[in-house]
Image (spheres, grey):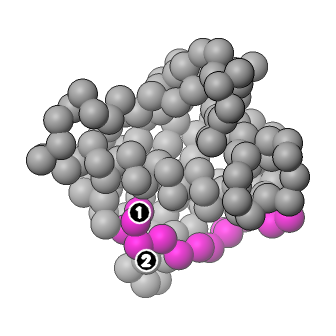
């Protein structure tokens, strides 16, 4: 497990995002955002706001509920969903590090429960944000 005080990681996908704001729909199960969720764990939805500047990315739930994410998939040695954060957070603030692709979690009180789940959460956010920013895609494709 990783303590995320200044947790540094590399992501060229986040670094390639254009400056701006966007939102994305995500499935919920018991008020927790789901990644790679099975159909029975998609009982509700919420939206995430993603604000991107040259030096910072902020991810927050639009409904002002605390952000917690569960992941199920490759890299996690369990059939169960794994929480990304040890406890829910108000928002996730990422600041650019020393290199173009380095990002650092800004909050001192954010504890990452599982680094694979954390990486997959940010990877999926970056993919959806990238699709939404692509002018050649129809808005109806990516919700």
Find the residue positioned furthest to the top: 44
Magenta-drawn stretch contains 20: no
Say which label, 1 or 2, has the lower sequence index.
Answer: 1
Residue name at image x 35 percent, y 29 percent: 143
Q: Is residue 41 above or below residue 8?
A: above
- Whether the magenta-drawn stretch holds residue 8 is answered as yes
Residue 45: numbered disc: none
Work out whether residue 83 can be spotted: no
Closer to us: 38 or 46: 38
Residue 140, how many percent across, how many down?
A: 24, 27
Disc 2 marks which residue?
Answer: 101
Q: Quadrant of residue 74?
A: bottom right
Q: Quadrant of residue 66?
A: top right
* Residues shaded magenta: 1-15
Label 1: which residue? 14
Asked if residue 130 lies left or right of residue 101, the reply is left
Image quarter of the N terminus: bottom right
Counting from the top left corner in percent of width and height, residue 72 is at 73, 46
Rendering coords of residue 54 (x, y %): 30, 63
Residue at disc 2, secondary structure:
loop
- How far across and how far down the image is residue 135, in percent? 13, 47
**Residue toward you, 61 or 37:** 37
């Amino acid at each position: 497990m990783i303590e995320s005080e200044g947790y540094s990681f590399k992501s060229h996908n986040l670094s390639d995002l254009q400056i701006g704001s966007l939102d994305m729909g995500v499935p919920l199960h018991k008020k927790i955002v789901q990644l790679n969720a099975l159909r029975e764990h998609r009982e509700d939805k919420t939206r995430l706001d993603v604000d991107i500047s040259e030096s910072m990315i902020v991810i927050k739930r639009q409904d002002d509920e605390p952000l917690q994410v569960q992941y199920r998939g490759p890299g996690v040695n369990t059939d169960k969903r794994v929480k990304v954060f040890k406890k829910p957070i108000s928002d996730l603030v990422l600041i650019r590090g020393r290199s173009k692709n380095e990002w650092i979690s800004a909050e001192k009180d954010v504890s990452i429960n599982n680094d694979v789940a954390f990486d997959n959460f940010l990877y999926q956010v970056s993919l959806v944000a990238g699709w939404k920013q692509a002018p050649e895609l129809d808005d109806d494709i990516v919700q």
